[in-house]
């Protein structure tokens, strides 16, 4: 077994067989990512390796800061070549971090470059990757086609235009690209200036004034319908935690209209309003048969200096320590009790909550849809080998791995698709090892079915 070779992460013959014969051939259903629909619609040709690979990748930015790289060489005024050189210099220091494997898988799969990235190889790798990027085969659409991506679910604010999605729908492009409704900006009622600006944008997009509570409800409903017409099948909510305190329509109205008038909601009121909004959107989703995705637990922008300097999504977020159980229990109980609990995917960022999320999902299955309530893929700080193995093991112990909807890239980079290969190799290795140690029978029809379901067909049935 060698680094990034055909046997990478595959410790048994059966694991290798399952990966190469079954998993590797399955298309990718990337139902949650942060790719730009404009880049896909315009079939962007990337200017250089930095723009394709480093620009916007907060995973790499975070590692570079930890390695003592100055901010100018990360997000600042340095040239793209200088920033790439800083990353190349940092790569040998990422040994045992998932970025080390991802970096070299991406270089191999997209560019056929098998050299290890470091100072001594940086110029050759930069030149060769740029040569290939300039030829046109590694455009935004070209990458999706080459990586066998069947569906892309982008992440879209309901106040933004769906014009790029409309253009894509008419383009005849083979990969289906659909929006995902993400109303996170609506819950920033503790920051009146931000929510006021967003409400104005939403009003324009919906054609209904969102500066009143009734207007907000109407505008969200109209945009929900617009997203449905554009092929949307899911919403997504990035929330630190859900409140256990109930919030009536009357309470939500007071909180919203005060924020619009310039009065910041207290933390307790903001949490209450967030629960109200998430329940409201979940009810709309149930009516349309959509999936509600809850990304829970991230503590955003804890470093005030970098937050002021760089804004959001700059690689400064961390694992939150909020209590998740009571709010989730209220969310599910309210919807189940009124008969409006639809398909739901839970993502947790704190490994301490693994068993909680896996068990809670099982408590609200109702036999109507296989895998109706999902504990989703190991996310963000857990989307590395250890995190994936722990997620798969806990899900297998408490739920049904066979119904799992599998991996997402959750990325802003078109070059990140080898993360699906990384996940699939780990999954096949775990199953192969179970057979080798007598924990599972060597029933290839069952094993093939499991691998196919987790790698592709479960997600296809849910999101396509």
Image (tube, rainbow, N blue to C red):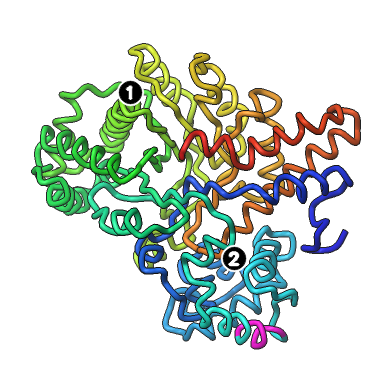
Magenta range is: 121-126
Q: Nearer the viewer, residue 20 or 100?
A: 20
**Label 1: few (<14), some or many (≥20) within 10 Å?**
some
Q: Nearer the viewer, residue 320 or 44?
A: 44
- Rendering coords of residue 167 (x, y %): 30, 59
Which mark is drawn over residue 245?
1
**Residue 157 seen in the figure:** yes
- Rendering coords of residue 19 (x, y %): 76, 48
Residue found at the far front of this picture = 172
Q: At numbered mark 1, what does the secondary structure look like: helix, strand or loop?
A: loop
Name which residue lies at 41% across and 33% down. Answer: 291
**Label 2: few (<14), some or many (≥20) within 10 Å?**
some
Q: Nearer the viewer, residue 374 or 73?
A: 374
**Residue 268 seen in the figure:** no
Residue 342 magenta-highlighted: no
Q: Which residue is mark 2?
A: 63
Q: Earlier in the sequence, mark 2 or mark 1?
A: 2
Apparent side of residue 234 relative to residue 146 in the rendered image (left or right): left
């Amino acid at each position: 077994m060698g680094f990034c070779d055909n046997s990478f992460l595959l410790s048994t013959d059966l694991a290798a067989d399952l990966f190469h014969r079954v998993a590797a051939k399955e298309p990718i259903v990337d139902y949650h990512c942060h790719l730009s629909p404009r880049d896909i619609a315009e079939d962007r040709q990337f200017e250089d390796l930095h723009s394709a690979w480093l620009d916007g990748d907060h995973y790499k930015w975070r590692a570079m800061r930890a390695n003592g790289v100055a901010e100018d060489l990360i997000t600042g005024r340095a040239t793209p070549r200088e920033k790439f050189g800083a990353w190349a210099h940092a790569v040998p220091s990422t040994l045992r971090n998932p970025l080390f494997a991802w970096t070299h898988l991406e270089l191999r799969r997209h560019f056929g470059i098998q050299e290890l990235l470091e100072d001594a190889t940086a110029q050759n790798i930069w030149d060769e990757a740029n040569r290939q990027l300039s030829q046109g085969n590694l455009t935004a659409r070209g990458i999706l086609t080459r990586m066998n991506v069947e569906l892309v679910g982008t992440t879209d604010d309901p106040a933004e235009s769906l014009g790029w999605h409309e253009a894509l729908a008419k383009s005849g492009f083979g990969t289906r690209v659909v929006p995902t409704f993400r109303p996170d900006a609506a819950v920033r009622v503790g920051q009146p200036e931000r929510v006021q600006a967003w409400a104005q944008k939403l009003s324009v997009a919906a054609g209904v004034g969102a500066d009143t509570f009734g207007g907000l409800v109407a505008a969200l409903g109209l945009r929900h319908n617009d997203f449905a017409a554009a092929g949307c099948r899911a919403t997504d909510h990035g929330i630190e935690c859900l409140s256990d305190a109930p919030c009536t329509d009357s309470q939500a109205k007071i909180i919203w209209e005060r924020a619009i008038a310039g009065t910041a909601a207290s933390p307790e009121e903001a949490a209450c309003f967030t629960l109200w909004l998430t329940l409201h959107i979940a009810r709309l989703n149930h009516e349309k048969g959509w999936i509600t995705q809850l990304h829970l637990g991230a503590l955003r922008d804890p470093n005030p200096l970098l937050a002021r300097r760089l804004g959001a999504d700059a690689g400064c977020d961390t694992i939150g320590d909020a209590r998740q159980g009571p709010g989730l229990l209220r969310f599910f109980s309210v919807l189940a009790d009124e008969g409006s609990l639809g398909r739901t995917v839970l993502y947790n960022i704190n490994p301490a909550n693994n068993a909680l999320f896996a068990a809670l999902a099982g408590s609200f299955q109702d036999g109507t849809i296989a895998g109706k309530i999902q504990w989703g893929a190991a996310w963000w700080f857990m989307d590395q080998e250890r995190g994936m193995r722990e997620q798969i093991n806990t899900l297998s112990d408490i739920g049904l791995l066979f119904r799992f909807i599998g991996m997402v890239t959750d990325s802003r980079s078109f070059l990140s698709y080898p993360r699906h290969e990384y996940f699939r190799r780990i999954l096949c290795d775990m199953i192969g090892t179970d057979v080798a140690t007598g924990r599972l029978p060597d029933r290839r029809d069952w094993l093939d079915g499991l691998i196919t379901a987790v790698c592709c067909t479960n997600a296809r049935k849910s999101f396509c």
